[in-house]
Amino acid sequence: MKHSFWFLLFCTFSIYAQTPPQASEKNELKYPLNPSGSHFFKVTFMNQTWVRYNQSNPGTTVVGEASPQTLDLGLRRTRMQMFGQITDRAFVYFQMGMNNFNFLNGFPALGNAQGVASNRKIGFFIHDAVVEYSAFANKDWLKIGGGLTILNGLSRFSQPSVTSIMTMDVPVFAQATVDQTDEFSRKLTLYARGQVGKWDYRLGLTDPFPIGTNGNPVAAISTNSSFAAKGHHKQYQGYLIYNFFDKETHQTPYMTGTYLGKKKILNIEGGFITQKNAMWRTENQGRDTVYNALKLWSIAMYADMPLNKQKGTAISAYLGYFNTDYGTNYLRFNGIMNPANGTTLPLSGVSGTQGNAFPMFGTGSVVYGQIGYLCAADLLGKNGTLMPYASAQLADYQRLNNTAGIYSTGINWLLKGHNAKLTLDYQNRPVYQNAVNGQLNANGRKGALTLQYQIFI
């Protein structure tokens, strides 16, 4: 029965896609619900496949064997969206999928895990399930919604449209609580969002998940701040944009990475996330427990606009400052789709330091910037065009004795815009060793070369 449902759904959208009412919709799996098409239901599919060579962090092991470098194949993201404008005021949005699926999927981390049961056939889950009501029919002035959603404060990269990002991947540090007190950056949230004149706003009241439900053992409380395992408080967040020229896309809560010259965007933006007693640590040799609020804010400028409309060239650029207060000495290493699961050289007070991990989250501040240039539309004739880019993330965290600089450069081969593109990316990151008093010192640098193929329809 379940297979029959998906087969009928696919056939329905396939038939409609072959005979669209408008040329602009010929590549969409979109079904109209009224004669004008203003009411509709749409389905999209996206897959990002990675092939990656990585120079491992010191001491890295893979399934119990020393691995100074790795070569892996994986699915960074596999997603399906279903959404639609059901009436003039009612909007619904669903997303399902999985992330970071490589040969280690489901394998217990940190150890050879011989004899330990695991399950590689997990990971496909509901990302978003949102209902939204527009207070003004056919206007974007005020939309009130709720459910499991990526709508966030802090920044555009805290709620990114991953199908349209310019760099190969988003700066994940901006998804500040990812898989700690949220579900892959999604949270149960009641929100209001809208566009009034040149202003774009969103406000959210979030019910975060307890740290004990993230699937990993809860870290023991220590003198370094961590997410509190006791107590539960609501999270408040907000995000505000001032658009100097065109307005940003507003159909879903997701923020576009690059419009590839289709819009003239220049804006200033800022956001925040705060939560009472979200963090804890010990003082006085473990005798006292101290709670701290989670306090994060950012301010940034974003530009994405055509340079020469006749040639199709465009520029995309972003520069942002992030103030990240997780409490005293908070530090979290993370490696995207980490190709390793163990280390013989652990670092003091942090876990998950193997493979391609680096200090991604911490108390302190981050400056992040990226820039890209879209070449002429006919650069490669019928084979699309190119978009080279570069990005830099400079993190000044309390527990690091050196600024952590993570640099990436790459090039997109846009076979058909964001619908079909190949991306070759090189990332250079610092590695660390233990210092005194729980601090970490930089100890060289490592790199990773990744090829991604994205298909989106």
Image (tube, rainbow, N blue to C red):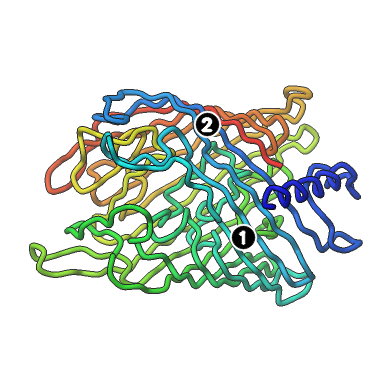
Q: Position of residue 386 (x, y in %)?
A: 66, 28
Q: Quadrant of the C terminus?
A: top right
- The residue at the point 24 percent across, 30 percent down is 59
Left or right relative to 379: residue 192? left
Residue furthest out toward the bottom: 135
Residue furthest out toward the front: 1
Q: Position of residue 346 (x, y in %)?
A: 21, 38
Q: Is residue 289 above or below residue 120?
A: below
The earlier-in-sequence mark between 2 and 1 is: 2
Q: Label 2 is placed on what type of residue?
A: Trp
Quarter residue 65 falls in: top left
Left or right relative to 90: residue 424? left
- The residue at the point 21 percent across, 63 percent down is 281
Q: Secondary structure at mark 1?
A: loop
Left or right relative to 200: residue 206? left
Q: Position of residue 295 (x, y in %)?
A: 37, 65
Residue 136 - label: none
Q: Position of residue 292 (x, y in %)?
A: 28, 68
Which residue occupies the foreground of this view, 358 or 31?
Answer: 31
Residue 253 - label: 1
Q: Is residue 416 above or below residue 213?
A: above
Q: Label 1 is placed on what type of residue?
A: Pro
Which residue occupies the foreground of this view, 8 or 172?
Answer: 8
